[in-house]
Amino acid sequence: DLLLSTVSLSLFFGSQAAEAKCTDIESCREIGERKDQELMKANPVIRLGGGLQYKVLNPGVGTDLVPEESGSRVSIAYTISQGTGSYMYSRGFGYNKVDVGNGQMVPDIGSIDSLLVTMGAKDVPVGIQRALVGMKKGEKRRVEVPPSVGFETSDWNPQPTTFRGKQQIKDYQGRLFGRGDTQPPFPAPTIWDVEVLRIYNSKQ
């Protein structure tokens, strides 16, 4: 389980650091596993079916929730990685630079650059739309997206703007569809960190 392994590795080492009483690797592992189980009960992985699942990284604020209705709009920041952990591309988290005029390049933080998603459109994959439902402003989720509800459902949107991002998409497509006789197709998932920046009501 990619999503579980991504979070539990950091939790395991964090548990060892927090607990000074363990005296060997076995006792440290047992303490770490107990703490992991406690954390998983408090913040479980939510499974939406068909391999689509997410974990809340930040609970967000307020009472407004992203609705499921087609036509609803929400502004998000995101970062995408392959299931192997290889970073692909992002928007709104400050990892890239955007031109704000006069050749001035600044980090693409959410207040400057974000993605406006219309529910029911093909701005993001179906799996991400399903995972967005119920999110609050400021909430951040890590979503594991299987190919069945992945990029092909959004015509490969959102598309990367950087050279590295475009190369990463080509590499992912090679894994997904195969590379002739040298590599068979593989149902590779993608991992998305998605943060809701703004939820629009029908009058906005």
Image (spheres, grey):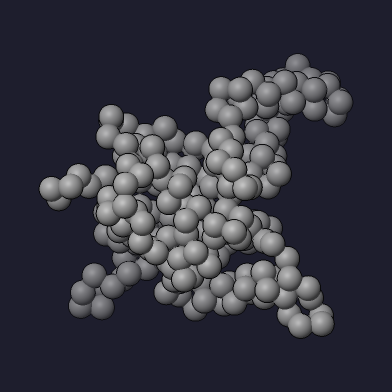
The residue positioned farthest toward the left in the image shown: 203
Q: Quadrant of residue 46?
A: top right
Q: Position of residue 65 (x, y in %)?
A: 32, 36
Taking the spot 24% from the left edge, 70% from the top edge, the residue there is 100
Q: Nearer the viewer, residue 69 or 183?
A: 69
Front-most of 79 and 150? 150
The front one of 84 and 180 is: 180
Residue 94 in view in this figure = no
* Residue 128 drawn at (x, y percent): 47, 52
Q: Is residue 183 above or below residue 9?
A: below
Residue 132, given in percent of the width and then of the height, sits at 41, 45
Q: Residue at x 69, y 62 (%)?
A: 187
The N terminus lies in quadrant? top right
Q: With respect to residue 121, does 60 lie above or below? A: above
99 vs 24: above or below: below
**Total numbered labels:** 0
Tell which of 201 and 49 is nearer to you: 49
Is 80 displayed left or right of 173 in the figure?
left
Q: In the image, residue 77 lies at what x, y percent? A: 38, 54
View extreme (bottom): residue: 180
Give residue 18's quadrant in the image.
top right
Q: Look at 48% across and 70% down and name the residue there.
A: 156
Residue drawn at 52 percent across, 76 percent down: 166
Q: Is residue 9 visible?
A: yes
Q: Quadrant of residue 161?
A: bottom left
> Horizontally, is 122 left or right of 153 in the view?
left
Residue 28 in the image: above or below residue 155: above
